[in-house]
């Protein structure tokens, strides 16, 4: 999930907002009709000074739902965290154990941006990263 800072920053930057919408529109094949219409309407507008908070939230939610990342906040490698969480999954709750196994089997090197928080939570539970890693994210 996008942070308030990121939502506020992108809503105040119409050029960056439209560039992200255009990139998502051209690079994602599985968009719903609503998502495609939303992104198309943004790309066509050129007179907006800034966008609403809700529009920013939806744009970043679409990005988070479809984009994969190889690195988490704070610079942690998804490949390393997934592998270590997969190896230690027996120590997690059953739903998290199944989730880690499914993510690892799906792709051992990347993860959907929307799943980064859960991966980091599992890594903290396994003591793979410190509880105060959020300090790295804020920097």
Image: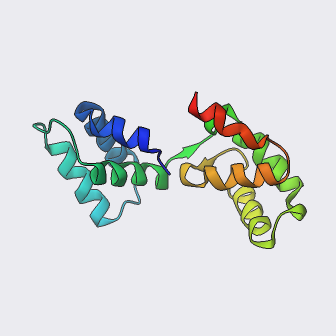
- Please determine whether, in this image, residue 60 is positioned above or below residue 35: above
Work out which residue is located at the far bottom of the displayed protein and give it.
Answer: 94
Q: Is residue 105 visible?
A: yes
For this rendering, which residue is in front, 78 or 126? 126
Looking at the image, residue 85 sits to the left or right of residue 26; the answer is right
Return the x and y of residue 16 as percentages of the image width and height: 30, 32
Left or right placement of residue 134 versus residue 39 in this view: right
Q: Which residue is farthest top? A: 139
Hey, which residue is sitting farthest left in the picture?
47
Regarding residue 28, the answer to whether it shows in the image is no
Query: For residue 79, which quarter of the picture?
Result: top right
Residue 125 image point, x, y percent = 81, 54
Disc tally is 0
The residue depicted at 83 percent of the width and 63 percent of the height is 92
Query: In what quadrant of the picture does the C terminus appear?
Result: top right
Is 99 located above or below residue 25 in the figure? below
Image coordinates for residue 138, horizontal then vertical, percent: 57, 33
Q: Position of residue 62 (x, y in %)?
A: 40, 54
Q: Nearer the viewer, residue 122 or 33?
A: 122
Q: Examine the image and state in which quarter residue 77 appears.
A: top right
Q: Quadrant of residue 137?
A: top right
Left/right placement of residue 21 relative to residue 115 reads left
Residue at image position (66%, 56%) is 118
| Up-down relation of residue 98 to residue 100 (above or below) | below
Q: Residue at coordinates 47% horizontally, 44% vertically from top-left?
A: 3
- Colouring scheme applied when the structure was drawn: rainbow
């Amino acid at each position: 999930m996008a942070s308030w800072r990121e939502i506020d920053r992108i809503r105040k930057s119409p050029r960056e907002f439209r560039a992200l919408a255009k990139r998502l529109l051209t690079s994602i094949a599985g968009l719903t009709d609503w998502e495609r219409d939303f992104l198309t309407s943004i790309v066509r507008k050129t007179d907006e000074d800034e966008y609403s908070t809700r529009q920013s939230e939806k744009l970043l939610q679409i990005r988070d739902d479809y984009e994969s990342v190889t690195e988490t906040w704070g610079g942690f490698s998804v490949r390393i965290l997934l592998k270590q969480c997969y190896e230690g999954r027996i120590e997690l709750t059953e739903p998290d154990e199944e989730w880690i196994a499914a993510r690892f089997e799906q792709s051992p090197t990347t993860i959907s941006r929307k799943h980064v928080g859960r991966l980091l939570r599992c890594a903290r539970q396994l003591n793979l990263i410190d509880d105060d890693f959020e300090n790295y994210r804020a920097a």
